[in-house]
Amino acid sequence: MKTRSVYRAVRTPGGLSLRLDLRALIVVVLLLAAACAAGVALIGTGDAKIPAADVLRTLAGNGTTYQDFIVNELRLPRVLVGLLVGASLGLGGALFQAVSRNPLGSPDVLGLSQGSTAGALVVIVLMSGSATQVTLGALAGGLVTGLSIYLLAWRQGVHGYRFVLVGIGVSAVMTAVNGYLLTKADLVDAARAVVWMTGSLNGRDWDQVWPLLALCAVLVPLVLAGAGGLRMMEMGDDVANALGVRVQRTRLVLMVSAVLLTAAATAAAGPVSFVALTAPQLARRLTRSPGPNLLPSLCMGATLLVAADWVSQRAFGADQLPVGVVTGVLGGGYLLWLLVTERRAGRI
């Protein structure tokens, strides 16, 4: 028996009428609370343990000099990067899955992450670039790869399965390019590249926070504003056109936004795998609501990545794993489960 979403109409003083999905709203609030709680717990863990109450007091500006340095300078930037990267990947994955109308339509499968990795490897291997140059290279690689997939998939518009198939092909090509670049690197650059390719939040500071925060501040409201058109597009292009949605223009804007979010997240933390694939699906199962579930997916991505970072630091004793290893293990298991489920349902 399926539980139906509960909607409530809300009318503003200006006469604007809104329809709220109460279950989705509750899920968003709970996920935000979970993300914040995981962030506070993560800030308080480490060699210098700080109780949660002291963490909150320090964040409010009332901590000691020692606590202020540990919390605000060393640990808070890492947590913020984790929240922003997870939110960007969750929202980007929801956009790709909604546009392609395919649960496998995520940056991991479509080659966006591999393209960003290729851009970073070019800078690391061929130019021995700085951390800032690696970030710019990853961003450029993701944008070029996204544009290539869109152009190759275009034929009187972009349609779901063709888009996914082209993305899988591009992903295979970029994976081969990345392997070739690693073989051309010297030992030091190869080791540096492998660490980056794993996906990690180690050593992240305020230099990674501000660009990603600025990009999210611009793109997230833009994407959420297009949620209505995206919901109509899920019923098919003909229906969306009949309802007044400018389908190709809306799809292009949302695709560019998704590529930018994914590329920026990869540039900040490396190719953290499977968050973009699993976050939208988990959010949809929690809300039990049709449509793209953009805001729940954003919150789910942030929660997943911060929780995975806590696991990577605390669950294996003295051995700390890169967060990409944890998300890869969990996401790989989820992908296998999803493929089995889709096959039993006769959709693949």
Image (cartoon, rainbow, N blue to C red):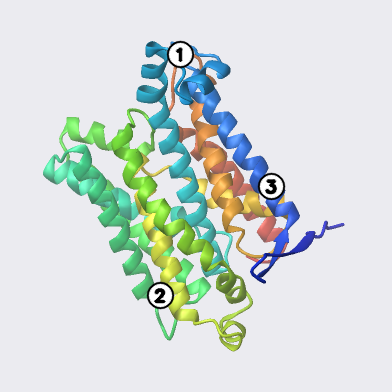
Q: Nearer the viewer, residue 229 or 154?
A: 229
Q: Nearer the viewer, residue 171 or 311?
A: 311
Q: Secondary structure at mark 2?
A: helix
Name the spot of residue 144 as percent of width and height, x first.
28, 63
Q: Secondary structure at mark 3?
A: helix
Disc 2 residue crowd, few under 14, some 14–19, many 20+, Cα 10 Å: many
Q: Is residue 294 visible?
A: yes
Residue denoted by label 1: 318
Residue 62 against residue 1 in the figure, above or below = above
Measure the C-alpha gap from mark 2 to mark 1: 47 Å
Q: Secondary structure at mark 1?
A: loop
Q: Which mark is residue 27?
A: 3
Q: Residue at x 51, y 24 (%)?
A: 42
Disc 3 residue crowd, few under 14, some 14–19, many 20+, Cα 10 Å: some
Q: Residue at x 45, y 13 (%)?
A: 318
Name the spot of residue 30 as percent of width and height, x first.
67, 41
- Quadrant the N terminus occupies: bottom right
Tag 3 or tag 2, which sits nearer the N-term?
3
